[in-house]
Every structure is written in structure tokens, then in C-alpha cells.
């Protein structure tokens, strides 16, 4: 059964109903770790739709087990946005809404969802 996920290493992603979902298994306290990991996934494995102009909402959810890692969420957001730029949208200036959260979960991971919310006049 094909559930639509494309996987490469610790990263997997899928597009469904206009939403791009990216998940990274595991956590580290170093936000800079995520940018090359996700970028490499998109460069090598992703075959989804090309980015479009318009406005986007991005939700980043860090799920942890036990004590949360010492990780600045603003640094995590910047690393994620830099990694998906050019694949989810053309430029991170297109992000009209950004939500970054830390939550206890069943496993340690980063979950990102990108939804197109509107159009910019270009």
C-alpha cells in the first residue's frame, strides 16, 4: 500500500490536499543539524510539485519524550525555513504565518506542515 510518503534517511515527506508535510525522526539540540539534512532530502529524493508564488502558513512542531532538549525554537524555525526554501515556496518572505511549538509526544521528531494560504500579486 502506497501512503504517499517519500523517504530518505531520517526525513520523509508527502503532499496531500494542498499541504506539504515533512517529518524528521529524532531530535538534537543543534538546530543547524536540520538544514543540511532536510535540504539533502529535497535535493536527492523529492519529486513533488514545484514551489509557487503566494502566501504560506508553516507549522513546525518539535515532539519530544522525557525532558525537552535545550533548543531555541527561533533557530529551529530559521533552519527549517532555509531548508525547504526553493521546494515548498520560492522565498521565506512568502511565509505569512509561522507557528513553532514544543510538545511532548510518542516519539522524538520534528513535524513541519506547509499550506498555501493566498496569492501575492506578481
Image (spheres, rainbow, N blue to C red):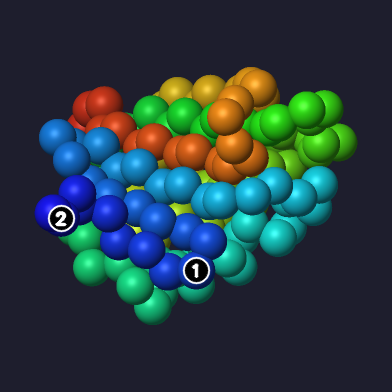
Q: Is residue 27 left or right of residue 86?
A: right
| Residue at image coords 53%, 33% | 60
Q: Is residue 109 left or right of residue 43?
A: right
Label 2 belongs to which residue?
Answer: 2
Give the secondary structure at mark 1.
Answer: loop
Q: Earlier in the sequence, mark 1 or mark 2?
A: 2
Identify the residue at image location x=23%, y=27%. 118
User: For this rendering, which residue is in front, 89 or 6?
Assistant: 6
Q: Position of residue 109 (x, y in %)?
A: 58, 42
- In the rendered image, is residue 26 in sight? yes
Question: Rounded to the nearest whole Å, what is the CA distance between mark 1 and mark 2?
Answer: 18 Å
Residue drawn where x is 45% and y is 24% of the image: 97
Q: List the residue tagged with mark 1.
A: 9
Q: Is residue 50 visible?
A: no
Q: Secondary structure at mark 2?
A: loop
- To which quarter of the image does residue 17 belong? top left
Q: Is residue 62 above or below residue 31?
A: above
User: Which of 41 and 98 lies nearest the eye of the viewer?
Assistant: 41
Task: Indicate the quadrant containing the N terminus: top left, top right, bottom left or bottom right.
Answer: bottom left
Task: Name which quarter of the figure residue 74 lies in.
Answer: top right
Counting from the top left corner in percent of width and height, residue 58 is at 43, 32
What residue appears at the point 20 percent right and 52 percent down from the top-left corner?
Answer: 4
How would you rate the neighbour count of disc 2 (Cα within 10 Å): few for under 14, some for 14-19, many for 20 or more? few
Viewed as shown, does residue 118 lie left or right of 32? left
Q: For the residues labelled 1 and 2, say whether their Cβ atoms are less than 8 Å apart.
A: no
Q: Position of residue 20 (x, y in %)?
A: 30, 43
Amino acid at each position: 500500500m502506497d501512503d504517499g510518503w517519500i523517504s530518505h534517511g531520517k526525513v520523509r515527506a508527502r503532499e496531500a490536499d494542498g499541504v506539504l508535510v515533512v517529518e524528521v525522526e529524532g531530535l538534537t539540540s543543534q538546530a543547524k543539524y536540520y538544514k543540511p539534512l532536510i535540504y539533502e532530502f529535497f535535493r536527492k529524493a523529492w519529486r513533488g510539485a514545484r514551489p509557487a508564488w503566494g502566501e504560506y502558513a508553516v507549522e513546525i512542531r518539535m515532539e519530544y519524550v522525557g525532558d525537552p532538549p535545550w533548543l531555541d525554537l527561533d533557530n529551529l524555525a530559521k533552519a527549517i525555513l532555509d531548508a525547504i526554501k526553493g521546494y515548498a515556496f520560492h522565498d521565506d518572505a512568502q511565509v505569512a504565518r509561522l507557528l513553532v511549538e514544543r510538545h511532548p509526544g510518542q516519539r522524538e521528531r520534528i513535524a513541519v506542515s506547509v499550506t498555501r494560504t493566498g496569492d501575492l500579486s506578481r
